[in-house]
Image: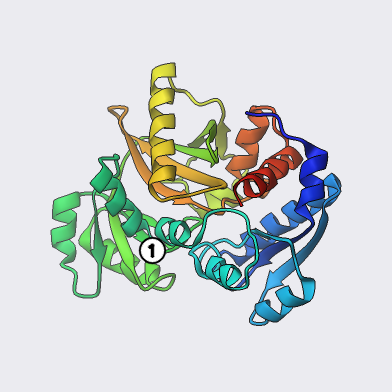
């Protein structure tokens, strides 16, 4: 990665407001991410404030008058283009992807349709509703994973292989989002890859004793394995990096994002989703990957700021 000038970046950043919390189901993770970023900015010498997003957000932002808003809101309302649109209307600079890219990445179906159109590998899927023929879905796809279309942290997700379980999990997933999908279950290795602008960070391979990398595996389990560098040949690593960068670019992402990918038993990769506001907690994959490439947490924050100052 290119060399960056810390003093110049800190000086140009001005007053940075870290936006955290909000009202989504991922609020608790967002609070942790926001606190970690705020403390890191203070260590760097950046003039920073932290703000728990509420119904009074516009008033709060006007009072703080930031030069840059560092978005650490996960999930709906913070990662889906809504707060990005608000900040655009207030003519405030902010980190990360813009309105359209944020909305597309948050909507797993829209993202997958774009990838299919571009010939990027992603698992077969279909939308569910209360009138779905559950038996027909299982007959067509076999084992599937049920997902809220707009959501993160693996909340509301479950692997099922029979019609009764599919219908039951659809009802559970519907409590997280009005739109619910199923995706053909890919059995194999899971990878998480951070991208910051044109640079692909080291791949993190995920290993859990659970059926898949769910919320508990991500944030609670102590025996979850994160393998970095991953168990990939140089050829497969290059193939994965190319796919990840293509997914990032296809949605128009900018700044920092994280791309999640599965690999089946035939070593074929499948795109799962792009997270435009990846977690920055002690359990998060992007800081871990950055550290493996010699970039500590505070340096990662500097690069996020640099990306915005260079692009904005």
Q: How is the image coloured?
A: rainbow
* Residue 310 image-quadrant placement: top right
Which residue occupies 62% across, 55% down?
95
Which residue occupies 45% across, 56% down?
101
Q: Secondary structure at mark 1?
A: strand
* Residue 295 image-quadrant placement: top right
In the rendering, at what x and y percent does residue 245 appear?
Answer: 44, 37
* Residue 78 image-quadrant placement: bottom right
Which residue occupies 48% across, 62% down?
99
Query: Is residue 84 visible from the viewing direction of this image?
Result: yes
In the rendering, at what x and y percent does residue 68 appear?
Answer: 70, 59
In the rendering, at what x and y percent does residue 156 appear?
Answer: 43, 63
Up/down of 79 relative to 65, above or below:
above
Up/down of 211 relative to 160, above or below:
above
Count of numbered tags: 1
| Disc 1 target residue | 148
Which residue occupies 18% across, 58% down?
137
Q: Which is more toward the observer, 69 or 74?
A: 69
Q: Which is more toward the observer, 153 or 144?
A: 153
Is 223 positioned to the left or the right of 132 in the image? Answer: right
Is 266 positioned to the left or the right of 102 in the image? Answer: left
In the rendering, at what x and y percent does residue 150 appear?
Answer: 42, 64
């Amino acid at each position: 990665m290119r060399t960056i000038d810390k003093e110049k970046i800190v000086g140009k950043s001005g007053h940075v407001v870290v936006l955290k919390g909000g009202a989504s189901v991922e609020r608790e993770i967002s609070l942790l991410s926001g606190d970690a970023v705020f403390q890191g900015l203070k260590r760097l010498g950046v003039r920073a404030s932290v703000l728990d997003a509420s119904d009074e957000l516009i008033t709060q932002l006007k009072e703080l008058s930031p030069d840059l808003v560092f978005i650490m809101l996960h999930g709906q309302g913070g990662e889906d283009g809504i707060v990005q649109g608000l900040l655009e209307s207030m003519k405030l600079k902010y980190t990360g992807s813009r309105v359209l890219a944020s909305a597309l990445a948050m909507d797993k179906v829209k993202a997958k349709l774009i990838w299919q159109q571009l010939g990027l590998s992603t698992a077969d899927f279909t939308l569910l509703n209360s009138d779905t023929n559950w038996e027909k879905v299982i007959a067509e796809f076999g084992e599937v994973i049920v997902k809220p279309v707009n959501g993160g942290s693996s909340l509301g997700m479950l692997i099922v292989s029979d019609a009764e379980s599919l219908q039951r999990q659809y009802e559970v997933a519907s409590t997280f989002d009005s739109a619910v999908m199923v995706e053909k279950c890919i059995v194999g290795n899971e990878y998480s890859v951070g991208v910051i602008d044109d640079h692909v960070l080291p791949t993190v391979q995920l290993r859990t004793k659970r059926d898949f990398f769910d919320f508990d595996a991500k944030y609670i389990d102590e025996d979850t394995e994160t393998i970095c560098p991953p168990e990939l040949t140089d050829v497969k690593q290059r193939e994965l990096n190319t796919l990840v960068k293509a997914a990032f670019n296809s949605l128009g992402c900018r700044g920092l994002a994280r791309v999640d990918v599965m690999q089946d038993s035939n070593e074929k990769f499948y795109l799962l989703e792009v997270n435009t506001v990846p977690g920055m907690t002690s359990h998060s994959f992007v800081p871990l990957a950055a550290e493996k490439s010699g970039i500590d947490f505070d340096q990662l924050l500097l690069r996020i700021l640099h990306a915005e100052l260079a692009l904005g």
